[in-house]
Image: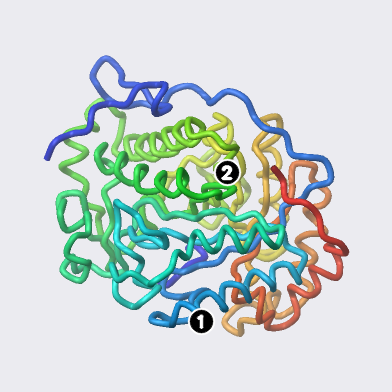
Amino acid sequence: MGRRRFVAGATFAALSVAGSGGVADAAGVDRVGAAAPGRRRRRAGSEFRGMWMATIANIDWPSGPGLTPDRQRAELRAHLDMAVERRLNSVILQVRPSADALWPSPHEPWAECLTGVQGRDPGWDPLGTAVEEAHERGLDLHAWFNPYRVANHTDPSRLTATHPARRNPRWTVTYGGRLYYNPGLPEVRRFVQDAMLDAVRRYDIDAVHWDDYFYPYPAAGEVFDDDDAYERYGGDFASRAAWRRNNVDLLVSEMSARIKEIGSGKTFGISPFGIWRSASSDPAGSDTPMGLASYDHLYADSRKWVREGWIDYVIPQLYWNIGYAEADYAELVPWWDGVVRGTGVDLYIGEALYKCGDLDQTTAWQDPRELSRHLTLAEGYAGVGGHCFFSASQVMSDRIGAMAAVVADHYPTTVLPPR
């Protein structure tokens, strides 16, 4: 599964090519259009050294709900200071964890992780402060949004009374004990883009970032109930799976085009599940017999997004050790290196720092040098432009010294982030 097991009416008209990256065919069905033109070049001597800072369920920050603004700001600064101390240069901060916001959004309520009550004003602007504090330290700040997750429960009455999911109950689907927006509805797709783009327009963020959650990870014995949407919009597709993939493709391509329209040099990156498809299902896939794949199970065609140039960078979550039979890190790094080759899309590798020293993990993860060996291996592939570590609390605590080993072996000096 993915790294974050917190575990972790009217129809909107088809968007134009210029405004969305998608086109409507003769039957009025939205289909993905052409690749976005032009790629920026990674500046010489730069390297991506990042960490994710998760706010959902207070995984990393704030350390708990309901802290005073001063305490929240102090904890934020401590995480940013630690990033500098570890010679990192980028922080990916989760600012829209569950269809709520870490800034005063006109579209969605204040995030529950701040005060413990969704919709309650925390008395300060966390995203605005994070941008300022990061830039003062020479860190890039990537704003991390989750497009479709509404809640880690199934009870809409627990959402704030003005929540869009309560005002538009037909937008939601209950699945796996959670509440999601339905990716098959064009009006949902437009709304979630508008909600995210508000932050893009208002703040000097360096990038828009999405993680691995599109359609949800499979829940045994359950069916994601999008029958009505499929009946309305999916008739011209060969299968429901193809229609779902097209829905996600449209979300990605439209968002890419709209970010570019805003300008200001903001980039767009995604950290998908590390396996696109396995070779047993597709000869173009990786030699990874795990059985779970983003293309088949999350309806996320991550390889296509790179090849079409809709994203500026990709951070596949390669959260397996070197030699792991089901999904070998040493197999997946060269596979992803091949995917980005010639595309101009930057490749950074997502690293499972959270597994290091976790006694529930395999023996490989008890070795403090496992991650350092990952970086040594990746140095042999020209397409790899850096690494990102999950997550900020482990960067700080460094349970068995794995992060310290990475810094000692690979980060002797500070370097500029890619731009």
Looking at the image, is 367 positioned above or below residue 389?
A: below
Amino acid at pointer 2: Ala
Q: Nearer the viewer, residue 83 or 362?
A: 83
Which residue is rendered at x = 54% and y = 58% of the image?
290
Give percent across and percent down for residue 215.
Answer: 36, 51
- Mark number for residue 71? 1
**Quarter of the view holding residue 404:** bottom right
Q: Nearer the viewer, residue 295 or 149?
A: 149
Which residue is rendered at x = 55% and y = 49% of the image?
204
Looking at the image, is 199 positioned above or below residue 60?
A: above
Residue 357 makes an appearance in the image: yes
Residue 328 makes an appearance in the image: no
Q: Residues within 10 Å of mark 1 (few under 14, many from 20)?
A: few
Q: CA distance from mark 1 to mark 2?
A: 49 Å
The C terminus, quarter of image: top right
- Mark number for residue 298? none
**Residue 245 appears left or right of 204:** left
